């Protein structure tokens, strides 16, 4: 398993507002959005070090896009993501997660998609390397 697969499964199981699904990379074409969905992707990866070398911990940055038909839907979805991951530690699927940090949030206007709202969360996930 990968951290992407484990994070997708974790979000799908814990963020109940994501009624239309949780996807990695892109939303499948013709995917209906009734209330909200999550799309996320890895944006960075960096190892963590101790004084004696590698700590066998990776810090992975994820961009998590919360999509909905209204800002109320997006607010609830983004808060659901934040509540699920903020300061999380423990097993996430087959991956041991040391910590998850919400490092930022922003709303993005999509002129090409006037019927949808979007909020982006930036996550830092510290996990044990295999």
Image (tube, rainbow, N blue to C red):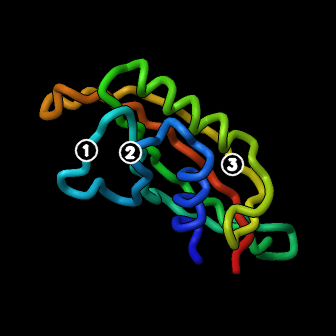
Does residue 63 appear to the left or right of 16 in the view shown? left
Residue at 62% x, 38% y is: 102
Q: Assign the N terminus to one quadrant of the image.
A: bottom right
Q: Position of residue 26 (x, y in %)?
A: 30, 56
**Disc marking residue 32:** 1
Labels 1, 3: front one: 1
Lower position in the chain sequence, tag 3 or tag 2: 2
Q: CA distance from mark 3 to mark 2?
A: 24 Å
10 Å crowding of disc 3: few (<14), some (14-19), many (20+): many
Q: Position of residue 32 (x, y in %)?
A: 25, 44
In this view, which residue lies farthest toward the right? 52
In this view, which residue lies farthest toward the top? 72
Position above or below: 68 against 128:
above
Q: Are marks 1 and 3 in contact (CB under 8 Å)?
A: no
Q: Position of residue 48 (x, y in %)?
A: 72, 65
Does residue 73 appear to the left or right of 108 in the view shown? right
Q: In this view of the protein, which residue sits in the foreground, 112 or 27?
A: 27
- The local secondary structure at tag 1 comes to loop
Residue at 51% x, 26% y is: 76
Residue at 57% x, 73% y is: 2
Does residue 111 appear to the left or right of 118 in the view shown? left
Residue wearing tag 3: 100
Q: In this view of the protein, which residue sits in the foreground, 26 or 70?
A: 70
Q: CA distance from mark 2 to mark 1?
A: 7 Å
Q: Are marks 2 and 1 in contact (CB under 8 Å)?
A: yes
Q: How many marks?
A: 3
**Disc marking residue 20:** 2
Q: In this view of the protein, which residue sits in the foreground, 55 or 122?
A: 122
């Amino acid at each position: 398993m990968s951290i992407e697969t484990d994070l997708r499964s974790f979000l799908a199981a814990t963020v109940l507002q994501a009624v239309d699904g949780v996807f990695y990379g892109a939303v499948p074409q013709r995917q209906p959005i009734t209330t909200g969905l999550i799309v996320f992707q890895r944006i960075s990866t960096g190892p963590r070090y101790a004084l004696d070398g590698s700590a066998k911990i990776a810090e992975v940055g994820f961009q998590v896009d919360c999509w909905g038909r209204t800002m109320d839907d997006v607010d609830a979805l983004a808060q659901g993501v934040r509540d699920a991951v903020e300061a999380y530690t423990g097993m996430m699927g087959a991956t041991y997660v040391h910590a998850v940090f919400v490092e930022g949030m922003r709303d993005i206007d999509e002129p090409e998609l006037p019927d949808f709202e979007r909020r982006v969360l930036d996550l830092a996930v510290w996990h044990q390397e295999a």
